[in-house]
Each structure stands twice: as C-alpha cells, then as structure tokens.
Image (cartoon, grey):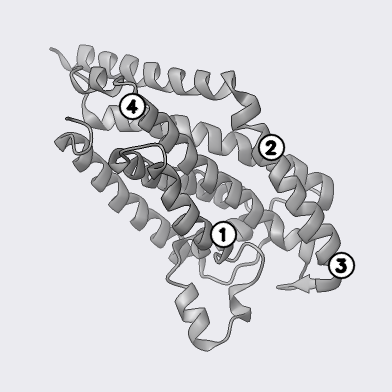
Amino acid sequence: MSVEVSARSYWIGYQTILIKEITRILRIWAQTLIPPVITMSLYFVIFGAIIGRRVGEMGGLPYMEFIVPGLIMLSVITNAYGNITSSFFGAKFGKHVEELLVSPLPPWIILAGYVSGAVFRALTVGVLVWLVAAFFSGFHMYNVAVTISILFLTAIVFSLAGFINAIYAQKFDDISIIPTFVLQPLTYLGGVFFSVSLLPGITQQIALVNPIVYMVNAFRYGLLGVSDIPLWIAYAITLGFGTVLFVICLTLLKRGIGLRS
C-alpha cells in the first residue's frame, strides 16, 4: 500500500469514527448538551449572584467574574471525560470495538477519533456555558491564544483519562467510580471557587499536586489576565499529563488490554 493510499484510508477511518461520535452527541443533545448548561447556570445563580454578593472580591475580581473560568473548565473536564467513557465502553459492551481492532486502522487513529469526538462535546458545552456566563458577568477575553489552547489541551487530557477508564471498566457501574470519587473532588478543589493563594501553608502545597489547579489558572489568565500559577508551569504540567496519558492509552490499545476476551 502506497503512502498516499495509506494516508487516505487512515483519514477516512478517522472521519468515520469522528462523524459517528458527533452524530451520537447531537442525536441525544437533550442528554449530552443541555443538562451541563442548566447545571452551570444554577452554579452562576447560587454561587455567583447570591453567595458572590457576600464574598465580594476574590483575587482582585468580583466573585462572579472570578468563578466564570473555573465553571467553564469544570464543564469541559466532566464532559470530555464522560463522553469518551460512555461511548467507548458502549462500543466494548456492544462488541463494536472488535470491528475496529480487526480493521487495518492503526491504534492511534482509533484513539484520535474517539478523543476528537469527546473534545467536540467538551468544547461545545464549554462555549454554551460561556454564553450563559456572559449573561451574568459580561464577555471577557484577555488572551485569545491562551484561552483557546488551554481549553483544547484540557479537553484532550481528560478525554485520554476517560479512555483509560473505559478500557478497564467491566460493567457500566465502573465508568462512574472515577468521576465520583476522584475527578469530582479534584475539580472542586482545583481552584474553581477560590484562589489557591488563600490556602494556608501546607494545604497550598498539597493543592498544587492537583493538575486541575494549573489548567483552571491558565484558563483564568486567558479570560481575565490573573493567575495564581506561572503560565509556563501550567502549560508544562498540562502537556506533561497529556503526553503520559497518550502513551498509556496507545499502549493499552495496542495490547488489547480489557478489549480482547
């Protein structure tokens, strides 16, 4: 097979997986897109409009503005992770994944297709939440490049993390354990509702182990121009996690761990 034919077949395979994922997301839009927007709207009302009046300022910003980047990032993280776990595990459960494994597509194309689908949903929800946030606090964009790049990278990182969860999951209950007991605590302690600089001594050091802290702060810098973390460190941590997770996902897919019975 020539390089040109190989590249074309890979592109067709990637497109097929991506279109399938996007079609699935849009077909059940009432479950995939609307609920997170409603949930985030409630956060804006309760934490921003009501509690925010009592808090006043956080990090030199009105509290409503301060929590906007964190809530957008929260929606991106949970939807990127949740989409790929449910979709890929569904393919495992329905035995559809076996067709992919015996196809001539390389593992990285399969991984790229599913990750791209999850990123599509995460960014779509993120934009919708952003529009809701603009209603409450106005539209802000301090640095376009940082805003878009960190949003995209975060969606990829948690898509890859969700893929690992889906590979090891043996039943539907298994895909909710990590989001409930690991992902949710990390996101809420990741600087979404507060500035990490307010934490005392050792607690602040512990919080800095959480990678979500770096992603939220980088995105907050992109939107509002403020951050508790140097920007280059945030990018280094995000890219480092993404690289490690990509290698793990590719290795698991190549070896067929959790996929071949």
Question: Which residue is tagged 2?
Answer: 128
| Residue drawn at (43%, 50%) of the image | 177
How many angstroms separate mark 1 from mark 3 (CA)? 23 Å
Q: Earlier in the sequence, mark 1 or mark 4?
A: 4
Mark 4: amino acid: Phe
Q: Secondary structure at mark 1?
A: helix
Where is the N terminus found, in terms of image quarters?
A: top left
**Percent x, y for residue 261?**
17, 30
Residue to which mark 1 is pinned: 216
Which residue is denoted by mark 3 in the rendering? 53
> On the rendered structure, is 229 left or right of 59?
left
Identify residue for label 4: 93
Query: Gap in Å between the C-alphas at discs 1 and 2?
Result: 18 Å
Residue 56: tell me if it is visible: no
Q: Spot the residue most to the bottom.
A: 201
Q: How far is mark 4 from mark 3, CA to CA? A: 48 Å
> Counting residues from the N terminus, which is met first, the one under dot 4 or under dot 3?
3
User: Which residue is nearer to you in this view: 230 or 208?
Assistant: 208
* Residue 55, position as x, y percentages in the image: 80, 72
Task: Kindly state the secondary structure of the residue where label 2 is placed.
Answer: helix
x and y percent of residue 4 in the render?
A: 22, 14
Mark 3 or mark 2: which is in front? 3
Label pair 1/4, CB-CB below 8 angstroms:
no
Kindly report which numbered mark, 1 or 4, lies closer to the viewer in this rendering: 4
Taking 206 as reference, is 199 left or right? Answer: right
Q: Is residue 71 above or below residue 135?
A: below
Specify which label sits upstream in the sequence, 1 or 2. Answer: 2
Q: Are marks 4 and 3 in contact (CB under 8 Å)?
A: no
Q: Residue type at mark 2: give it.
A: Leu
